[in-house]
Image (tube, rainbow, N blue to C red):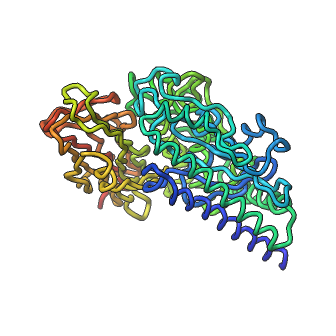
Amino acid sequence: MKLQLVRQVLWNRLIAVVEEQANVLLKTAFGPITREAGDLSAGVYDTRGRMLAQAVTGTPGHVNTMATAVAHFLERYPAGTLRPGDVLVTNDPWMGTGHLFDFVTVTPAFLKKRLIGFFASTCHVIDVGGLGFVAEATSVYEEGLLVPHLKLMDRGRPNESLLAMLAANSREPTQVRGDLMGLVSCNEVATRRLAAMLEEFGLADLDALGEHIVSTSRASMLEAIRGLPRGTWRASMPLDGYEAPIELKAALTVSGNGIHVDYAGTSPASRFGINSPKCYTDAYTSFGVKCIVAPGIPNNAGSLEVVTVSAPEDSIVNPLRPRAVTARHLIGQTLPELVFNCFAEPLAGRIPAEGAGSIWILGLSGGPQLEGATPQATRFNVISIGIGGMGARPAKDGLSTTAFPSGVGAIPVEITEAQSPLLFRRRELAPGSGGEGRQRGGMGAVIEIENTEAQPFSIACATFDRRHNPARGRNGGADGRVGRVALASGKVLPGKETYLVPAGERLIGEMPGGGGYGKKR
């Protein structure tokens, strides 16, 4: 009993360490998508690179990709070669978090010059050059600067050559450098807290505690899976796509050894930047399984390893280099809903209706470079976030304007207005957007934006989906309402391209609603 109590105390302290790590990043980040929306992750790893604990603050797409990303760093920088003050970095989509806008940093932690583990963190930066946050690119080379696994800090000294290269390739160099330094800072604080924790409890390393965490989580996850019906269940989901509609297909198999999800039959990779690299596909598939099977079990290397994923090469859920991937979350964040659909038959009556899925990232920019703008037009490059509704639950309505599965928040309109000449005339719930049923689907948001200058501005619609394929109701519930993007004058902006909003016009975006559950009485 005493050992169990000590382990529980140590676990609680470890969670406190990674929560402080995440909060340092929230406080020091320059970019509002990190600082305001919480698009980040933080975690601690043992000396073998296994994730032991994650901060609650953060997104599954970051946390679960980071679970495997640290191993890629250690292949290139073996643990024995690292020294105090080293920080490693990459934004490689296939070995990081799925697109170039997310930087992963890894910092070794030491106690009395002995390696005791690693801390990793991730955040989304505003710009890495290339075409920007759009889906029009046809290869990753057009999407921005790809940083291979390098040292961002070498024994405490910044890699100024790398930072200068990033600054020269970014439209917002100050924000990008600030966010990277925020990643460095949050990891550094966490290494100090971990060393102090081990000293306080008289421990020389994390090895014994780490093995207990991983093995216990693995056993608990397997126990939860063994309580499910055995068999294979299939589901499919249509999405709007880019140049052609997309069909996602999954076969979920429950066995005594775990759960396997196979995406055979899913649409091939797109020519454009909506493809989800396998690491990102794995991350959101595992998250979807865990939401249904064992939401209360800690998310770490142990619980994650019993969920496996296969996907056809060069499909939209496993694109090969150099496919374009900027808007990968359009696909990845829909996968938990597809996993839920697989569980609908064996766990009848327990699975919610479909929700809006991926968030809409509104890439808004302006300046004299736009057609019809004058030389006096203010240059700006900002991001806002549009959020749809969640699907209705068997016993409750769906949550409105809630970003499932990413968990990010909306950026306050005041922040966007302070960074640009844009004005949000409306940001409110869209009445009737949630599907009807015994339980109503969550409502999406409706926004209306104009430029306070007599100048045009542009909107990148890269991540806008469910404008033709609504979130489907379950057990007789009605579908949610589809999304819509238009000008106030009535012109609909139908695709995923970047559009010009003429001077004097207003942009209106209506986010999709969640599906309803059960027949309305």
Q: Quick check: 11 left or right of 161?
A: right
Task: Report whether residue 407 is seen.
Answer: no
Q: Quadrant of the C terminus?
A: bottom left
Identify which residue, 279 or 290, lies in the foreground.
279
Residue 437 locus on image (x, y percent): 32, 56
- Quadrant in which residue 284 is drawn: top right
- Quadrant in which residue 339 is drawn: top right
Kindly give the residue lying farthest to the bottom in the view shown. 2
Q: Quick check: 47 left or right of 330?
A: right
Identify which residue, 396 or 240, lies in the foreground.
240
Task: Report whether residue 191 is seen.
Answer: yes
Residue 20 locus on image (x, y percent): 61, 64
Identify which residue, 193 or 297, lies in the foreground.
193
Residue 449 locus on image (x, y percent): 22, 45
Above-or-below relation of 169 to 471: above
Q: Residue at x 57, y 32 (%)?
A: 277
Residue 126 locus on image (x, y percent): 45, 41
Q: How many marks?
A: 0
Q: Quadrant of the N terminus?
A: bottom right
Q: Residue at x 45, y 37 (%)?
A: 127
Q: Residue at x 38, y 54 (%)?
A: 410
Q: Residue at x 60, y 34 (%)?
A: 162
